[in-house]
Amino acid sequence: MSGDVLSNGPALLFCPADRPDRFSKALDRSDAVILDLEDAVLPAGKHEARLRMSSAELDPNRVIVRVNAADTGYFRDDLAAVRRSPFRTVMLAKTESAAQLDEIGDGLSIIALCETARGVIAADAIAAHPNVVALMWGAEDLIASLGGSSSRRADGGYRDVARHARSRVLLAAGAYERRAIDAVHVDIPDLPGLEAECRDAAASGFSATACIHPSQVEVVRRAYRPADADIDAARRVLEAADAKAGAFRFDGRMVDEPVLRQAREVLRRAGE
């Protein structure tokens, strides 16, 4: 299977697979690009999109290919096109079971997109699949699968069912030591809302957030990078731990191994 595409950074940018004129620009502007054969491509353009994707000259370690759901008539053709390409990380749209992942076969790393009620409920079994490297959740398809009309409240926050799905997918990923990717923020001009959401995602344990517009990339990167004060605090508590045994008090706070692990994660996200 491929290397860890998500190690490049937290900002993943979707790009329609039938727009090769955008491929290099999307990759230049993001940490990894998701060439999309699913929602971004109309049925009449699927064949051309597969041809464009499979012949793209891009760094395979920074490319994810989103294929159509396993129960569609496009899935097997998508998968065959991926196997003809240099890319080895696929995102399966609307993943609903581990059995669907078996159909992908070996040799490809899988990002399972849990964006239906069935997919969210099966998230732990999906995360346990040996070829899965990450889980992502999706709010809009989830609400549609429930017969709802909006994933967010009037104040912009997610409805409770969407928050539950987000948490369930994150927990399933963590339980099996997989990465977790947060859903896209569909309100493109709402960059403050995106930043707040990404800060919460990073603090909660997500590794990345998917973007649908280049303007979102720098916001995601900034939000995932810890604040200078947090970096300084992490350094100081880890330095203090070198001279201590077991739990200890530091800056008025009890410090034990979970707190130290959080501090190490802050420094990891800061690139130290």
Image (cartoon, rainbow, N blue to C red):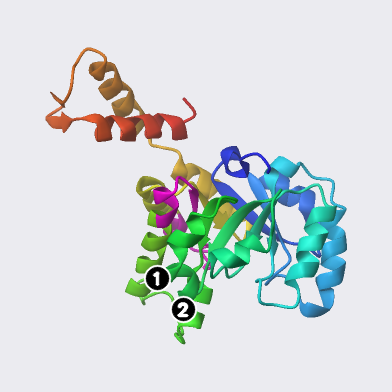
Closer to us: 251 or 91? 91
- Is residue 94 visible in this depiction of the protein? yes
Looking at the image, which residue sits at the far top? 243
Q: Which mark is residue 112?
A: none
- Under circle 2, the secondary element is helix
Residue 145 in the figure: left or right of residue 84: left
Asked if the magenta segment contains residue 13, the reply would be no
Position in image of residue 146 (x %, y %): 45, 83
Q: Is residue 38 above or below residue 272?
A: below
Closer to us: 107 or 14? 107
Name the image quarter holding residue 82.
bottom right
| Mark 2 / mark 1, whichever is N-terminal | 2
The amino acid pointed to by label 2 is: Ile
The magenta segment is 172-194
Q: How many marks?
A: 2
| Residue where numbered disc 2 is placed | 143
Q: Is residue 35 above or below residue 232?
A: below
Position in image of residue 245 (x %, y %): 18, 17
| Residue where numbered disc 1 is placed | 162
- Under circle 1, the secondary element is helix
Q: Is residue 136 above or below residue 226?
A: below
The amino acid pointed to by label 1 is: Ala
